[in-house]
Structure formats: C-alpha cells, structure tokens
Image (cartoon, rainbow, N blue to C red):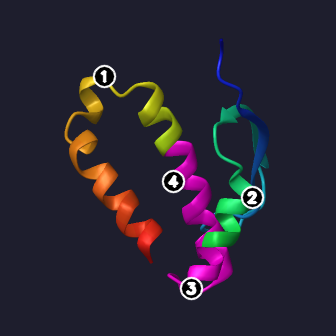
Amino acid sequence: MQKRSNKYYLTLSLKEYANGDTQPAKELGIEFDNHDEIFGIIQRIKDKNIFENASEATQFAIGLKLFSEIKLKHRNNPLFEELNEVFPIFMKKLKSL
C-alpha cells in the first residue's frame, strides 16, 4: 500500500533584481508531495519566534520541508551521508523549542 501524501503547488516569482530592474520577469511553478501539512508547520515555526519576523519563519519552514522531503526520499544518496547522522539531532532540537 502506497503512503498518502499532501500535494502542493508552489509558485516562485522574481519581482525585482538586485540592481532594481524588474525585467525580464521570471516565474517558476512546481508541484510536489510532502508527508507533512506544511501550512501547520509554518504556523508552528512562527509561533516559536525563532526568527526576527514571520517572513523569515515562513522561508525557513518552506525551505526545510522541501529539503528534508528530498533528503528523506534519497537517504541512501552519498550526498546526504554526513547529514543522515546530524539531521535527526537538528530536527529534535527544533521540535523542542
């Protein structure tokens, strides 16, 4: 039996370049699955007040969930070898805050 996962669609739009230009506009949309309900995680990270503002908490939560799901799916990839030892420690620390 296949595990069920939440299905998401994420849009990333480049609004302004570092030099102030707004053109050429760029946008990327991706579909992905995640075993967690990410909106709830975003709220829990915001509630912990780890970062200076809610935007940083949201960025962290989204980045962490995108990264950790790929790391989990590819845990045997040599790229993640060192992280497989320390990542669970990091996650326990985050959850304990």
Residue 12 in the image, given as x and y percentages of width and height = 73, 49
Q: Give the CA separation, mark 2 to mark 3.
A: 16 Å
Q: Which residue is mark 3?
A: 49
Q: Is residue 88 above or below residue 31?
A: below
In which image quadrant can residue 9 be found? top right
Dot 4 and dot 3 residues touching (CB under 8 Å): no
The residue indicated by pointer 4 is: 64
Residue bearing the label numbered 2:
39
In the rendered image, the vertical position of residue 4 relative to residue 38, given as above or below: above
Secondary structure beneath dot 3 equals: loop
Disc 3 residue type (three-letter): Asn
Q: Main secondary structure of the magenta part?
A: helix
Position of 79 compared to 21: left or right? left
Q: Which residue is mark 1?
A: 76
Q: Quadrant of the N terminus?
A: top right
Q: What's the magenta region? A: 45-67
C-alpha separation, residue under disc 1 versus residue under disc 3: 34 Å
* Mark 1 to mark 2 CA distance (whole Å): 28 Å
